[in-house]
Image (cartoon, rainbow, N blue to C red):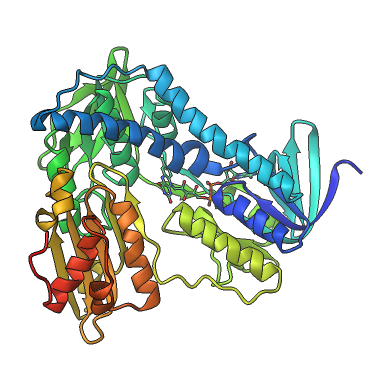
Amino acid sequence: SGNEIRADVVVLGGGPGGYTAAFRAADLGKKVVLIERYAALGGVCLNVGCIPSKALLHVAKVISEAEEMGAHGVKFAKPKVDIDEVRGWKESVVNRLTGGLMQLAKQRNVQVIQGRGQFVAPHHIKVETEQGEVSVSFDNAIVAAGSQAVKIPSFPVDPRVMDSTGALALADVPKKMLVIGGGIIGLEMATVYHALGSKITVVELGEQLIPGCDKDIVKPLHKKIEKHYEIFLNTKVAGLEARKDGIVASFEGENAPAPQSFDRVLVAVGRRPNGKLIGAENAGILVNEQGFIPVDKQQRTNVPHIFAIGDIVGQPMLAHKAVHEAKVAAEVIAGHKAAFDARTIPSVAYTDPEVAWMGLTETEAKAQGIDYEKASFPWAASGRALSINADYGVTKLLLEKDTRRVLGAGIVGPNAGELIAEAVLALEMGADAQDLGLTIHPHPTLSETLCFAAEMAEGTITDMF
Ligand code: FAD
């Protein structure tokens, strides 16, 4: 009947993990049903994550670069920001991509059902759609239900207290904005709002911005943004109080500022998985206390015919991890001998400047007692870096002592996110410092900084700008 559907593979959640798994499974000959509660596919990443944030960060970059050129002989007038047009542009980028996904689903005969899905039995998912309840039976399921922003229950419910989705909605440009959490998402949104004209205060509980990245790589970012923002490390927001004329925040910590009022507050203190919201218990799927679904290298849950991928299976919660896991799950279901076997998953903060790292960090190497060698190339010695006003950048390589193979890399500076990919390839291929140093990089580019760092380690560097 109309509300009974059978599928070889059902995918729960239409984010980067879910649509990739659905498309790959369909390409491998499976009859696939993709369940997504929202009208648009793409999940957090396309709708309220990676893509809209990068569109707005592009706006921020154009504004700040124009401003920086003022000191070098090109003076622009103060930019006039039409917030409705900026928002419209961001939305057009998102809509192009999500619209494209619907086309791609159709081309592959992937049946998309819009509604909230819940497991009701090991081989059944019930979907609440606008037309009523639909029951989907399946041979295999792939759970890709993602994550959501962590809320702090004691904070007031008020439109001025936002999560990243609220911040990306770009309702207005607040005069004073408090960003709680100095991680990637908080700092990216701070970059956007600062460029649009907000006065930014960042409060971070830990002892450095972007915890997880080496301190020496974060430092040039910190030094640059502290000229514009107020930054408080080792500081906690003790409370928020919604008043008519603003949100009053109070702080705790040795260097904590006095209580003060903000026009908007962004809470960016992390994300939690949606594992407890999908009726997992009805299918016997194990969900841990935090809401993550444990899986093996083939993305298989404790229930052999059910797989899970993306943010819901664990850290790092990144789109490129979800997409790779998705392909593994679909291929294993199709009988291939696939496994998730990445040596590293790179991380990027698209701040100004960008920060990127991959493989082992120095902090981890020290904690694990790993014998490593380090080469840090200062961008002040790169002709290309100087010509784009980025002498503060750093490219750092960590090498294994005996083999001189690449163990890790950290980069700070414009385009660090693009540059880190070469280091990821080096790690995956088992390249050593000599491989990087003897590979001819185009001159003058920032990509040379990886080659120069390798040459520093090899003792073969000459002064070549
Ligand atoms: P999601 O994208 O969360 O998708 C899950 C989908 O499942 C959602 O569409 C949801 O509606 C649906 N769903 C959940 N439960 C149900 C249900 N019961 N029934 C039906 N549908 C359901 N990552 C990067 O790699 N690079 C970045 O630059 C980046 N920037 C980010 C910026 C922000 C502001 C945020 C918040 C995140 C960012 N991320 C970034 C993280 C990235 O968005 C996630 O890692 C990625 O979206 C995870 O994909 P996923 O498929 O696991 O889950």
251 to 331, vertically: above or below: above
443 to 157, vertically: above or below: below
**Relative to 146, is 36 on the left or the right?**
right
Quick one: 352 or 152, which is closer to the camera?
352
Residue furthest to the top in view is 244
Residue 286 % position (x, y): 59, 63
Write the residue at 41% across / 58% down. Answer: 316
Q: Is residue 294 visible?
A: yes
Location of residue 30 by image quarter: bottom right
Residue 250 % position (x, y): 21, 30
Report the number of discs. Answer: 0
Residue 261 % position (x, y): 22, 21
Write the residue at 28% across / 25% down. Answer: 196
402 to 248, vertically: above or below: below
Location of residue 334 by image quarter: bottom right
Write the residue at 56% across / 59% down. Answer: 309
Quick one: 274 or 97, which is closer to the camera?
97
The quarter of the picture where the C terminus appears is bottom left
The quarter of the picture where the N terminus appears is top right
Q: Is residue 253 visible?
A: no
Write the residue at 38% across / 46% down. Answer: 270
Residue 220 % position (x, y): 15, 49
